[in-house]
Amino acid sequence: MHEPTHRLPPGPRSEIWQTLRYLRDPVGSIRDLGRRYGDLFTLPSLGGALVVASAPEAVRAIFSAEPDTFAPFAADAMAPVLGRGSVLLQHGAAHRRARRLMQPPFHGARMRAYGATMQDSARVHLEALPRGRPVPIEDVFRDISLNVIIRTIFGVSAGERIAACGRGVRDTIAAFGPLIATFRALQREFAGFGPWARFRRLLGGVHDLLRQEIAARDPARPGDDILSLLVAARDESGAPMDEQEIVEQLFTMVIAGHETTATALAWAVDELLRQPGLLGGLREELRPLGGDPDRIAQAPLLDAVCAETLRLHPLIPLVSRKLLRPFEVGGHLLPAGTGLGACLLLVHLREARYPEPLSFRPQRFLDGKHPPPHEYLPFGGGARRCLGAAFALHEMKLVLATLILELELELAAAPARTGVRAATIGPKGGVPVIRRR
């Protein structure tokens, strides 16, 4: 048995050059790193050295490690956006408490209560799609996703209030662009001027809206929305979440769930409209189900299409942590303070697991062929796996089924290339489609 080396794995030296390459071509730059350096390489980063793993055994070691081995990576960069109390930025006992309080509203069985709302929102927004001219379908999916969040997570039902919340959230997310997210030097107020100052003003407005909704809730009589359930939640000592913590967790849900669900749906449409036979097979599967959300969620081919979309187009290419203690991976003993990440993109493109990995082939996931968790992880893994995974997947299936059954679309552009957003990657141009008459 070989002794582990204390040297970091090789990797590119220039952080600026690597960042620029990533902004120009995120998928190509990551695949090139895998070809050049193999299953383990080191990226230079403002948050410290970041070691990136993509071999299945290394990914399994990372996600099965004791949770207290890690803290969030580059938490200081995201704290002004999400807040220190965000579940994404906590670790240790605070993180475990937050997840225990937040998990019950996202239990898979509860998602069925939100199915009708998801379908209703999809029908309203899809029916408003104009005919005869190109429209980025991702923009429509963003509106659907935001409407679902406001109604099921925030619990807002009045039309004017939904519109006000929608404008506030939409403007705030749009103000937090990839340049602000990537270059921390731009995260300065400049005497109240500039993009960061504008983002902070908009964020404050959204926080005020959420505080008003929290004040309107009665913990003794919680509603079905997730905000009401968080207000009523109590930890082991009987203590509730305080107002600021609830505000930060709610905004985290918006950031984590709004753009990601819309992006996944846009990729699915881009792929399906290029395979008419597959699209026809989906219609045949869905038509006899009568619009029943529970039966739709169990449809095998629809499930396989969603799974393959998330495999080929992972929304977050790299999940990163910071080591709080030494950790061995791939023959390297990494010291505390080092960043360690699992590259979901490279894991999902491994030819040994996924033959012809760049081809869209939902058949990979039919007949119970789902791979093990360390080789398919669109929602991350381990103790920090996405809390909203069941919610997001349920929404993706119902919205996609509604579109397939009720609209005839055609693509208005060549296959989409991948571009960088604030914290995710997605199709450039938003997948323009034309609604057929």
Image (cartoon, rainbow, N blue to C red):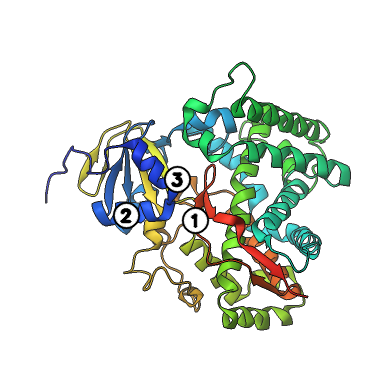
Mark sitting earlier along the chain (2/3): 3
**Vertical side of 192 occupied by 243: above or below:** below
Q: Which amino acid does label 3 sit on?
A: Leu
Instruction: Please tell me whether mark 2 sits on a helix, a strand or a loop.
Output: helix
Mark sitting earlier along the chain (1/3): 3
Is 293 on the left or on the right of 66, as rendered?
A: right
Q: Residue drawn at (61%, 25%), measured in percent from left and top?
A: 194
The image quadrant that residue 116 belongs to is: bottom right
According to the picture, the residue beneath numbered tag 1 turns out to be 418
Disc 2 from disc 3: Cα separation: 14 Å
Is label 2 in contact with label 3 (beta carbons under 8 Å)? no
Q: Where is residue 63 in the image (x, y as percent from the top left)?
A: 39, 49
Mark sitting earlier along the chain (1/2): 2
Q: Which of 66 and 264 is in front in this view?
A: 264
> Tag on residue 23?
3
Q: Residue drawn at (65%, 81%), measured in percent from left and top?
A: 285
According to the picture, the residue beneath numbered tag 2 turns out to be 32
